Image (cartoon, rainbow, N blue to C red):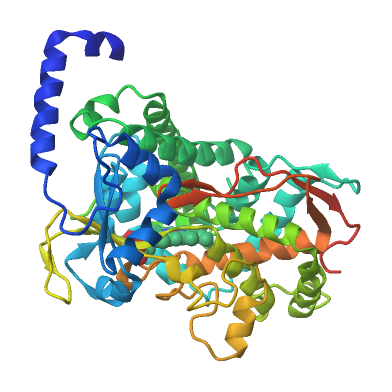
């Protein structure tokens, strides 16, 4: 159908007119030097190729040459990258907005993208809930996460005491997804394979759809989104999530009514369904549906935390000398009775350092991405116009001015810095030198939960399993512009140790 539509002359005329209008509108002279502008590269093919595969060098060379802000041409436009010295200016500037950027770059108005839209719904229900309930203080959620991690590991990694390969994506995503679901969706659905498949598929289809849409000229995207298989899958999954969650909410309401009729206390639920249901319903703002909220949580939490787990697993497998000290720390923190609590997790300082070090070396090249929502002015007086897309350079993370031997992996790096009195050495702490969780008013509100989840997963994994990389396998993150993904084809082998939690 799309082919037929695009083959009509009228459609092509409209496309040409819309594209010209778009190009005229967006064609503005870059304010800062462009680092990937090449002679005769009229269609920007080389510029985009260099951006996709070589962005780290483009940024390093650009900053070395120009010593200040630079412009990078990317498919669909250009981005301004500021030196990290401007991080504080970025964090406090009200002319810059993270949420507007997400809305536009991830097309949150398209049908099927309700899971994305709910993250930034006008009543802020998701972010307020995360800040209030998933803080570093919340003890009550940990037992459920702990139980579900144990069950998910059993299911995904199994009991075999001989070395065997795990299914890399399924058997890591599955554990994080279920650990998160124990707090997001609660007991009815956390262990339900259909629900797990639904949220995981939604996240995958949504991010793939966003990537595909970016490949089309902006004026065509509202049309194209009706025809992509991924956007269509998202629309179906939103309908299914809404129906499932309406059943859960209705069932809980029935239980509460039955209890009240019998003069009993209603059952208590400690999960995102209950917390967001209890949030005041601001009549002006149309609270998102429970299903949309669940998808929003999965979109924000699933990929990010799974990537972190994957990278730590690879790094621990590459550095077996870390395993025994980590096991000892876990044993001491949780005691012989596997007593899970925030204090125990806080005591896992080496594990914290290992996770942060793994995060440091996956080259996320920029942070603090913002849209300029009103013309704004840099401290040196340079004006940046409304509509620009700005971010800061993250290369402090691997700069010799910040870290000794920055290119090598040192699991003890942040522990040593912590003991030497450096600031912001913990995994959840974001700073100019390590801005993986962003900063300012949009700093990631899920970072405490991500930390708890990762520590509990790794405590179970290290206690119960040996891990190694398949002989001969060398992994490297796959760069994709300013971002990188952990090797999607990593080959991790595991075997059960014959030890159970509770030691
Ligand atoms: C290792 C895992 C994670 C990483 C690396 C990560 C990273 C980030 C980053 C870079 C931002 C943008 C901050 C800024 O630009 O200032 C962000 C925002 C956000 N994150 Fe995370 N995140 C992680 C896990 C989570 C989890 C588990 C949740 C939910 C439980 C979550 C929920 C959110 C939300 C809702 C926002 C939007 C905040 C806003 O717009 O104000 N994240 N995250």
Is residue 121 in view?
Answer: no
The image shows residue 422 at horizontal and vertical percentages of: 52, 87
**Residue drawn at 42 percent across, 71 percent down:** 132
Picture quadrant where residue 502 is located: bottom right
Is 461 rendered above or below residue 201?
A: below
Say which quadrant the C terminus sits in: bottom right
**Residue drawn at 62 percent across, 41 percent down:** 192
Direction bottom: furthest residue:
421
**Residue drawn at 42 percent across, 40 percent down:** 207
Is 301 rendered above or below residue 357?
A: above
Is 474 rendered above or below residue 225?
A: below
Say which quadrant the N terminus sits in: top left
Image position of 331 (left or right of 63): right
The image shows residue 14 at horizontal and vertical percentages of: 11, 20
Camera-side residue of 7 and 30: 30
Image position of 211 (left or right of 32): right
Picture quadrant where residue 236 is located: top left
Camera-side residue of 121 and 309: 309
Camera-side residue of 52 and 347: 52
The image shows residue 359 at horizontal and vertical percentages of: 55, 63
Is 116 rendered above or below residue 8?
A: below
- Disc tally is 0
Is residue 192 in view?
Answer: yes
The image shows residue 487 at horizontal and vertical percentages of: 60, 45
Image position of 277 (left or right of 485): left
Q: Quadrant of ligand 1?
A: bottom left
Camera-side residue of 485 and 248: 485
């Amino acid at each position: 159908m799309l082919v037929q539509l695009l083959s009509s002359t009228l459609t092509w005329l409209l496309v040409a007119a819309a594209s010209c209008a778009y190009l005229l509108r967006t064609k503005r002279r870059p304010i800062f030097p462009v680092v990937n502008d090449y002679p005769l590269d009229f269609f920007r093919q080389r510029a985009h190729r260099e951006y996709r595969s070589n962005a780290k060098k483009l940024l390093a060379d650009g900053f070395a040459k120009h010593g200040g802000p630079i412009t990078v041409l990317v498919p669909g436009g250009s981005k301004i990258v500021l030196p990290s010295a401007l991080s504080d200016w970025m964090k406090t500037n009200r002319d810059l907005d993270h949420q507007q950027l997400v809305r536009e770059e991830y097309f949150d108005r398209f049908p099927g993208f309700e899971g994305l839209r709910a993250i930034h719904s006008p009543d802020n229900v998701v972010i307020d809930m995360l800040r209030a309930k998933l803080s570093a203080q919340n003890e009550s959620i940990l037992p459920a996460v702990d139980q579900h991690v144990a069950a998910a590991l059993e299911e995904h990694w199994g009991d075999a005491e001989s070395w065997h390969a795990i299914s890399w994506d399924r058997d890591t995503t599955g554990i994080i997804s279920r650990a998160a679901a124990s707090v997001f969706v609660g007991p009815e659905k956390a262990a339900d394979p259909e629900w797990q498949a639904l949220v995981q598929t939604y996240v995958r289809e949504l991010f793939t759809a966003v990537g595909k849409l970016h490949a089309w000229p902006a004026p065509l995207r509202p049309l194209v989104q009706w025809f992509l298989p991924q956007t269509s899958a998202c629309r179906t999954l939103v309908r299914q999530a809404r129906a499932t969650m309406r059943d859960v909410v209705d069932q809980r309401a029935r239980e509460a009514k039955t209890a009240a009729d019998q003069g009993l206390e209603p059952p208590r639920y400690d999960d995102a369904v209950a917390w967001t249901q209890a949030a005041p319903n601001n009549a002006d703002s149309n609270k998102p549906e429970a299903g949309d909220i669940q998808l929003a949580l999965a979109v924000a939490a699933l990929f990010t935390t799974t990537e972190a787990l994957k990278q730590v697993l690879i790094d621990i497998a590459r550095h077996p000398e870390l395993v025994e000290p980590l096991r000892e720390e876990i044993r001491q923190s949780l005691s012989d009775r596997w007593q899970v609590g925030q204090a125990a997790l806080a005591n896992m300082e080496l594990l914290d350092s290992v996770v942060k070090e793994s995060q440091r070396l996956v080259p996320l090249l920029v942070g603090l991405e913002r849209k300029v929502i009103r013309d704004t002015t840099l401290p040196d007086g340079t004006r940046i116009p409304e509509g620009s897309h700005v971010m800061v350079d993250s290369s402090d993370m691997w700069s010799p001015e910040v870290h000794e031997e920055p290119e090598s992996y040192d699991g003890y790096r942040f522990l040593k810095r912590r003991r030497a009195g450096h600031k912001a050495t913990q995994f959840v702490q974001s700073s100019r030198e390590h801005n993986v969780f962003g900063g300012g008013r949009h700093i990631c509100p899920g970072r405490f939960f991500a930390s708890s989840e990762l520590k509990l997963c790794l405590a179970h994994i290290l206690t119960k399993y040996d891990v190694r990389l398949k002989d001969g396998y060398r992994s490297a993150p796959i760069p994709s512009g300013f971002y990188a993904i952990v090797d999607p084809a990593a080959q991790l082998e595991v075997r059960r140790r014959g030890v159970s939690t509770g030691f």
